[in-house]
Image (spheres, rainbow, N blue to C red):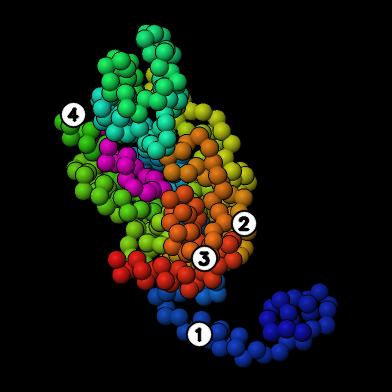
């Protein structure tokens, strides 16, 4: 006995099972409301207003992201699409699938460049390196010359050419990296890194006469900014370079002010950093385990325009990422009310349900500028000092909503207080 006509009544009868169907008035009213959907929205799949799981909403959001990119490249007549590693390269298969549906004939390439490598586009002197030491370790703690060499992946031949550095390998170089003792060695290392990055971008066709677009998950637009500054400083003429992101943080706007044509840094297509999204955009640790390259570690450098990458095992099992990818392709064939999807996604990120938090408990990601290790995205927080706990989660790059839920806090009230406090600022 049941109120579902098909599963509770028709299917049992087909299998010769006695069944009884009763009319659920609430269910009937819901069906009638569904039938009253206007004709122009009949192709849109109705997403239940019941609370959806975050890992079910993410693939739909990425399918929307891919559809938007295909529209953008048509408008700007782009000839190539570059997917930036280590995040956006997983979009290659669904992007090609959507392009075939839309009749687009564009070349899709994986561009192996990250935030650290892009900084070397405009790094010219030891003074520039000193200003960007945060890329290679915590600036509040000591950074030995040995660790700096390992972090910068300086080739052995350059080290062999400068035996004068050997006595300083285990000395903190934060205050002597631009000094006379290391000046020759550091300058040579920077020159090597600068030329290898620029040669790679030229060989890949990023810097060319054709219009191209760069696609990344997010978040601050550092690569676009550094590329724009490099082209302007070197007075290089190129085609239009459009940069698209899935999500953005508070730094994207300031970086957009520093970019100039031919580089165009667009607002994030799905989760821009704006008032309704601020709490969800504080950190994106909740997103990174799904999109981070599951096969390789950080880029070590380039040799003869070939990418050198360290191997590493990241936290998300391969089958989870494959399942995520297949769901994106599945949703590309469907239409949704994406505004409702995004609102539900935000709700799931800020105030998640217990199932999502339990699923994410063992997921890890690379925190902030640390490319060498991964940690859990969830951390225990204390209830007694909510603002302090929130700031610790924020500075530590943890999934805030998931951590608070994991700590059994009354999330709705706390996040509403946090949201109202942000809006009052």
Mark 4 or mark 3, which is nearer to you?
3
Cα distance in 3D space between marks 4 and 3: 54 Å
Element at badge 2?
A: helix
Side of 182 relative to 6 (left or right): left
Position of residue 150 relative to residue 289, above or below, is above
Question: Which percent across, then down, holds residue 159?
Answer: 40, 13
Question: Which percent across, then down, holds residue 371?
Answer: 47, 36
Mark 3 or mark 1, which is nearer to you?
3
The image quadrant where one finds the C terminus is bottom left
Cα distance in 3D space between marks 2 and 1: 34 Å
Question: Which percent across, then down, holds residue 360?
Answer: 59, 54
Q: Please name the residue that numbered disc 3 is placed on.
A: 384
User: Residue 69 versus residue 281: which sits nearer the camera?
Assistant: 281
Q: Earlier in the sequence, mark 2 or mark 3?
A: 2
User: Residue 167 versus residue 96: which sits nearer the camera?
Assistant: 167
Cα distance in 3D space between marks 4 and 2: 48 Å
Q: Please name the residue that numbered disc 1 is placed on.
A: 33
Q: Please name the residue that numbered disc 4 is placed on.
A: 234
Picture disc at residue 359:
2
Mark 4 or mark 2, which is nearer to you?
2
Cα distance in 3D space between marks 4 and 1: 62 Å
Span shown in magenta: 207-226
Q: Label 3: few (<14), some or many (≥20) within 10 Å?
A: few
Element at badge 3?
A: loop
């Amino acid at each position: 006995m049941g109120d579902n006509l098909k599963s509770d009544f028709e299917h049992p009868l087909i299998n010769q099972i006695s069944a009884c169907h009763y009319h659920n008035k609430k269910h009937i009213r819901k069906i009638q409301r569904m039938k009253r959907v206007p004709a122009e929205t009949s192709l849109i799949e109705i997403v239940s207003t019941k609370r959806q799981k975050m890992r079910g909403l993410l693939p739909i959001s990425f399918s929307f992201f891919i559809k938007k990119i295909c529209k953008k490249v048509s408008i700007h007549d782009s000839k190539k699409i570059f997917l930036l590693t280590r995040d956006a390269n997983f979009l290659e298969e669904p992007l090609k699938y959507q392009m075939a549906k839309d009749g687009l004939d564009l070349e899709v390439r994986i561009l192996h460049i990250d935030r650290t490598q892009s900084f070397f586009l405009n790094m010219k002197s030891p003074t520039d390196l000193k200003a960007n030491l945060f890329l290679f370790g915590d600036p509040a703690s000591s950074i030995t010359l040995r660790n700096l060499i390992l972090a910068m992946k300086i080739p052995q031949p350059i080290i062999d050419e400068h035996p004068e550095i050997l006595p300083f390998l285990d000395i903190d170089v934060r205050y002597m990296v631009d000094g006379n003792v290391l000046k020759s060695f550091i300058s040579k290392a920077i020159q090597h890194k600068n030329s290898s990055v620029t040669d790679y971008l030229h060989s890949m066709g990023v810097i060319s006469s054709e219009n191209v677009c760069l696609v990344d998950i997010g978040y601050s637009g550092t690569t676009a900014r550094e590329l724009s500054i490099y082209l302007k400083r070197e007075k290089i003429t190129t085609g239009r370079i459009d940069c698209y992101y899935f999500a953005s943080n508070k730094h994207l706007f300031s970086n957009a002010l520093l970019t100039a044509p031919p580089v165009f840094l667009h607002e994030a297509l799905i989760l821009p950093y704006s008032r309704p999204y601020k709490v969800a955009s504080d950190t994106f640790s909740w997103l990174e385990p799904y999109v981070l390259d599951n096969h390789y570690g950080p880029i070590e450098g380039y040799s003869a325009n070939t990418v050198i990458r360290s191997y590493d095992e990241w936290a998300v099992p391969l089958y989870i990422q494959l399942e995520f990818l297949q769901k994106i392709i599945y949703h590309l064939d469907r239409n949704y009310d994406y505004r409702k999807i995004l609102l539900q996604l935000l709700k799931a990120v800020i105030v998640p349900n217990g199932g999502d938090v339990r699923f994410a408990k063992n997921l890890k990601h690379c925190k902030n500028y640390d490319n060498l290790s991964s940690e859990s995205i969830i951390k225990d927080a204390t209830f007694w000092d909510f603002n302090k706990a929130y700031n610790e989660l924020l500075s530590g790059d943890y999934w805030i909503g998931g951590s608070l839920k994991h700590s059994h806090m009354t999330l709705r009230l706390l996040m509403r207080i946090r949201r109202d406090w942000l809006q009052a600022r």
